[in-house]
Amino acid sequence: MIPLDWFAAGNAGTYQLIVMTISIVVCFPLGLITLNYSQVDKLWSLLPPVYCLIVVLTAPFQPRILLMNILVWMWGLRLTYNFVRKDGYTWSGEDYRWPVLREIVKNRFLLELFNLVFISIFQNFLLLFIASPIFYVAYHPSESLNRWDLVCTLLFLFFFIIEVIADQQQWLFHADKKANKPWTKDGFLKTGLFKYSRHPNFFSEMCLWWIFYAFTFSVRPFSYINWTILGTVSLTCLMNGSTAFTESISCKKYPKYKQFQQATSKLIPWWPTKMAD
């Protein structure tokens, strides 16, 4: 079935669409008025748990959807905490990449078109779709909890822990960088998990949502591919594009970053080659 058919399966889809529409209607004018394009960023860790909770509260009860809901809430609470400590929820809190984009795109009309189409609409749809596997599971016949659910849960927790460690290492690095500690002189983190991947937190984030999608393999009829993969694929593409933009900024700011790129895997952790001093 296509996604629109599923919104007729119960109240969950209707409520999710209402929440998403409200988010779009609020985020776009706020970005337009304030020129702060991080409005969706502030909802990034909040909306998927809300979408999952809507399914749990409105769909026929299944242990699997309760498990999926718990995992996403755990992810959301942790990410929200990380966003709070970086002052992301302050009125002026904005992703450092948006000012760079404004310097590149001088035309205000094009910026606001980007704000409307990509930030406010596309990213809100994305947040709905990455949570959609729980909706798919809820309205399909499925087996009782089994070994596959255990595998998915353990993998989810594994990458969750990796992401927590990576974010904490980055947090400590930036604290030392503000204090002008000598080991931060290159301007970017290249120790700990970042020795093996330039973006271990991004890699873990993508893996988390692919694993979340894998919970749909327990429904009947079995299929490796269903419409909810749109969210996971879109997130993967978005994060790869975001990583490329981030690294283009880093290359301009930090003289040794290109050496780091040559020595260290971009996403998938791997043994590094030696960087020149």
Image (cartoon, rainbow, N blue to C red):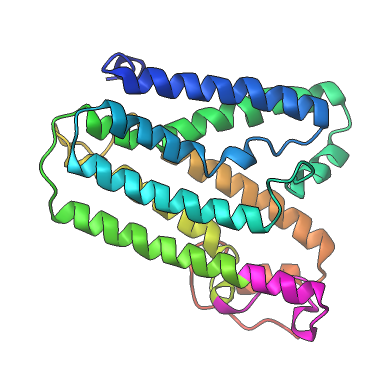
Q: Quadrant of the N terminus?
A: top left
Span colored in magenta: 170-192
Left or right of residue 81: residue 65: left
Left or right of residue 65: residue 269: right
Residue at image point 73% right, 47% down = 95
Name the residue nearer the viewer: 41 or 248: 41
Q: Judge whether 133 appears above or below 246 on screen.
A: above
**Labels in figure, total:** 0
Q: Position of residue 237 (x, y in %)?
A: 53, 42
Q: Position of residue 229 (x, y in %)?
A: 37, 36
Q: Judge whether 95 appears above or below 43 on screen.
A: below
Q: Is residue 9 magenta?
A: no
Q: Judge whether 16 appears above or below 270 on screen.
A: above
Name the residue nearer the viewer: 185 or 18: 18
Q: Judge whether 275 appears above or below 103 on screen.
A: below
Please identify the quarter of the rendering in which residue 275 is found: bottom right
Q: Is residue 191 magenta?
A: yes
Q: Is residue 114 visible?
A: no
Residue at image point 58% right, 38% down = 43
Residue at image point 27% right, 18% down = 10
Q: Quadrant of the C terminus?
A: bottom right
Name the residue nearer the viewer: 258 or 48: 48
Q: Position of residue 263 (x, y in %)?
A: 62, 74
Q: Position of residue 219 (x, y in %)?
A: 17, 36
Left or right of residue 246: residue 255: right
Left or right of residue 208: residue 176: right
Residue at image point 60% right, 72% down = 169
Q: Is residue 237 visible?
A: yes
